[in-house]
Amino acid sequence: MIDTAEALAGYADALRAGSGPVAVDAERASGYRYGQRAYLVQLRRAGAGTGLVDPVPLGDLSAVQDAIGGEEWVLHAASQDLPCLAEVGMVPARIFDTELAARLAGLPRVGLGAVVESLLGYSLQKGHSAADWSTRPLPEEWLVYAALDVEVLVDLRDALAAILEEQGKTEWARQEFAAVLAAGPPPPRQDPWRRTSGVHGLRNRRQLGMLRSLWQARDDLARRRDVAPGRVLPDSAMVSAVQADPQTEAALLELPVFRGRANRKLVGTWFGALTRGRGLPEDELPPHSRPGDGPPPANRWADRDPAAATRLQAARAALAELSQKHAVPVENVLSPDLVRRLMWAPPEPRDPATIAAALRAGGAREWQVELTGELLTDAATRA
């Protein structure tokens, strides 16, 4: 483990003196800690070897950034790791995403282990992907597992690059990788409490207000303790408490989960949150559902707008055929959400120029515009 400034500086010098792309990975503690910070950063470059960097005591890894910032970084499912790497000062200028490349290459399975086994013939050690990486000291076998994730990543990159070149998809991949970098971190979710498992079992706005209040109390506590919210109080317990609507703390303590010692100590917090939600004025209660900014669910189109349903059916059929022809998953050929928006409200006039402009405005890459523009124009003019 590289966990001192001196050791980090030494490894940064080795990275700078190395050659070729840099394999990068990060391990988080999802399900154990609040948020998605990195608890281990793995790097490997020819001439520098593998480095396992502990960002917890170091905090700022700008020494690594200075050493490799302009090089190509090789990551698997880059969008998952880039936000937590940015938090410690690591932001790539160029990437090669092996998971995304495997999708474009038409591989049937795109997980790291499956792609490595398929293209390189190695079987990676399994078993610690869901571990609590905030554990210190990290067990030796976990470090071996973490090192393996970058050990063959550059070899995998080269194998995938060769396949993409053979298939004529190198430029597609370049545009996709650039789009991942340009996207930046995902925006905060609106009304994240609506993602509570079991929320659809609540019947009215009053219950939704109670759940929101309870969710916020749990989230505040989880953030202060740096613990995953589900470990503070399970979603199922929150929904059950709202449905039971206990009128006293004693009644709340009769419910499963709340009987445990930890939640007995917090009964005032949980009951207070339920009481606040129950007492909200009518105009402060959340609506049954958050208004969407897009078209309605596709299964309602036939009733609400039969012409739009016809357009969508034609677009989906054409894209499915295109997906099969180029061996690219249909969702990578073009965003399904963008297809729905375009077919629900096509631009006027419905010609190739306006369709192409709408695709670009919706985030489609140039290769996608060129590949799908004509067939989507045809679908848009069906009805």
Image: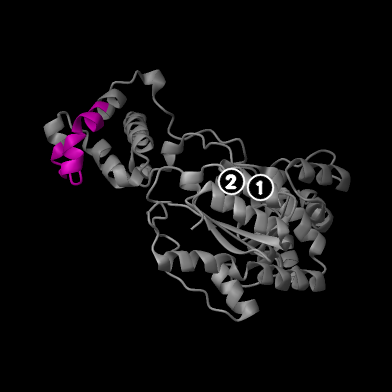
The answer to whether 129 is drawn above or below residue 217 in the figure is below
Q: CA distance from mark 1 to mark 2?
A: 7 Å
Report the residue marked by disc 2. 61
Q: Is residue 380 visible?
A: yes
The one of 147 and 218 positioned closer to us in this rendering: 147
Judged by its main secondary structure, the magenta piece is: helix
Q: Residues within 10 Å of mark 1 (few under 14, many from 20)?
A: some
Magenta stretch encompasses residue 206: no
Identity, as a three-letter code, of the amino acid under mark 1: Gln
The one of 213 and 231 positioned closer to us in this rendering: 231
**Residue at (46, 46) in percent of width and height:** 56
Report the residue marked by disc 1. 65
Provide the residue span drawn in magenta: 253-272
Q: Residue furthest bottom?
A: 121
* Residue 125: percent from left, percent from top: 48, 73
At numbered mark 2, what does the secondary structure look like: helix, strand or loop?
Answer: loop
At numbered mark 1, what does the secondary structure look like: helix, strand or loop?
Answer: helix
The one of 204 and 118 positioned closer to us in this rendering: 118
The answer to whether 278 is drawn above or below residue 56 in the figure is above
Q: Answer with the quarter of the image where residue 287 lies.
A: top left
Identity, as a three-letter code, of the amino acid under mark 2: Leu
Marks 1 & 2, CB-CB < 8 Å contact: yes
* Residue 172: percent from left, percent from top: 78, 59
Residue 184 shown left or right of residue 162 in the figure: left
Q: Residues within 10 Å of mark 2 (few under 14, many from 20)?
A: many
**Residue at (16, 38) in percent of width and height:** 264
Magenta stretch encompasses residue 256: yes
Q: Is residue 313 visible?
A: no
* Residue 140: percent from left, percent from top: 41, 66
* Residue 290: percent from left, percent from top: 49, 34
**Residue at (37, 45) in percent of width and height:** 228
